[in-house]
Image (cartoon, rainbow, N blue to C red):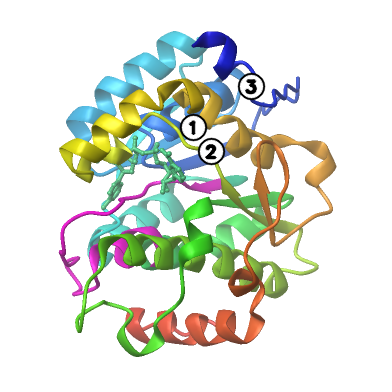
Amino acid sequence: MQALRNRFRSWSSDVTLDNKTVIITGANTGIGKHAATDLAKRGARIIMACRDMEKANEALKEVIEASGNQNVVTCRLDLADTKSIREFAEKINNEEKQVNILINNAGVMVCPYGKTADGFEMQIGVNHMGHFLLTYLLLDLIKSSAPARIITVSSMAHKWGTINLEDINSEKSYDKRKAYSQSKLANILFTRSLAKRLEGTGVTTYALHPGVVQTDLWRHLSKPEQAVMWMARPFTKTSVQGAQTTIYCAVAPELDTESGRYYSDCAPANCSQAALDDDMAQRLWELSCKMLSIEWE
Ligand SMILES: NC(=O)c1ccc[n+]([C@@H]2O[C@H](COP(=O)([O-])OP(=O)(O)OC[C@H]3O[C@@H](n4cnc5c(N)ncnc54)[C@H](OP(=O)(O)O)[C@@H]3O)[C@@H](O)[C@H]2O)c1
């Protein structure tokens, strides 16, 4: 099994991040936790933004022990609640002097129909709206920390997605897979739109597919689906492997001059035609602002 897994393109870099600050959402497990560990090893201050503080503090101990970096902290962030996002951003804006890398990593996949505290369908609400608002609220601090990067973890599942502007919350009909794909397509459209708005600021943006990775993300799959995924393990990535493209987007010097693109396996990758639709990206941007009651030109 290890031999099969070793075939994933490996990438390594000795870039250090001394005196840099990184925020990672959903850093208590899976891809986020391994990205946190790697970036902590490079010397960055790491802020693990998590919704469950018990899990977060357990993970914090592991990240500190594995990295040898004591400058790692946790901070509560529930992306399913705009009040929590605003409280988190206020704390960061008041207490941190810089944010050099924001990693919008947290996500939920194919969950039963549910709504966030603000009435958004859970997958579009957490995966897209939550990160959209978080980025908006931290943007001045990120800009003042330039050069800086904003990374959003999408998925190849975006290729099956469309944005349903008329029913973005899937209130008329809910297909859990379509809702996940929609949210992951929204991640890429957001990254493209953001890159345009940030031209000339020294802040660059990246979207990525981490691979098919064995993590807790699959918790909402049915038992037979989980059995299939278990059997497919030799063809999937470990969490450490799954974190590599995120780390690449966060530190690779060759990406300094790129912005708004999509990556997979530590390299630029092709996204769907729908993910290149700038008109849709703009309409999604406007709808997101309206739903979040923010003004962001
Ligand atoms: N695994 C894959 O095969 C795969 C493939 C493509 C893309 N991705 C993407 O990779 C990213 C990371 O996923 P993963 O595979 O590492 O999954 P994971 O192990 O389930 O981690 C997801 C993280 O998101 C957090 N989260 C969920 N809802 C949240 C909320 N409302 N507020 C704050 N945090 C929340 C989770 O917190 P709790 O632990 O408290 O639930 C967890 O820390 C996701 O964006 C996912 O869509 C994963």
Q: CA distance from mark 1 to mark 2?
A: 24 Å
At a point 56% along the width and 46% down the height, the residue shown is 209
Q: Quadrant of residue 219?
A: top left
Q: Which residue is mark 3?
A: 42
Q: Which residue is mark 1?
A: 46
Q: In the image, is the residue at mark 2 within 8 Å of ligand 1 by its beta carbon?
A: yes
- Element under disc 3: loop
Most foreground residue, 234 or 189: 234
In magenta stretch: residue 103: yes
The image quadrant where one finds ligand 1 is top left
Residues tagged 1 and 3 counted as in contact (Cβ below 8 A): no
Nearest-to-viewer mark from 1 and 2: 2
Q: Main secondary structure of the magenta part?
A: loop
- Element under disc 2: loop
- Element under disc 1: strand
Up/down of 35 relative to 127, above or below:
above
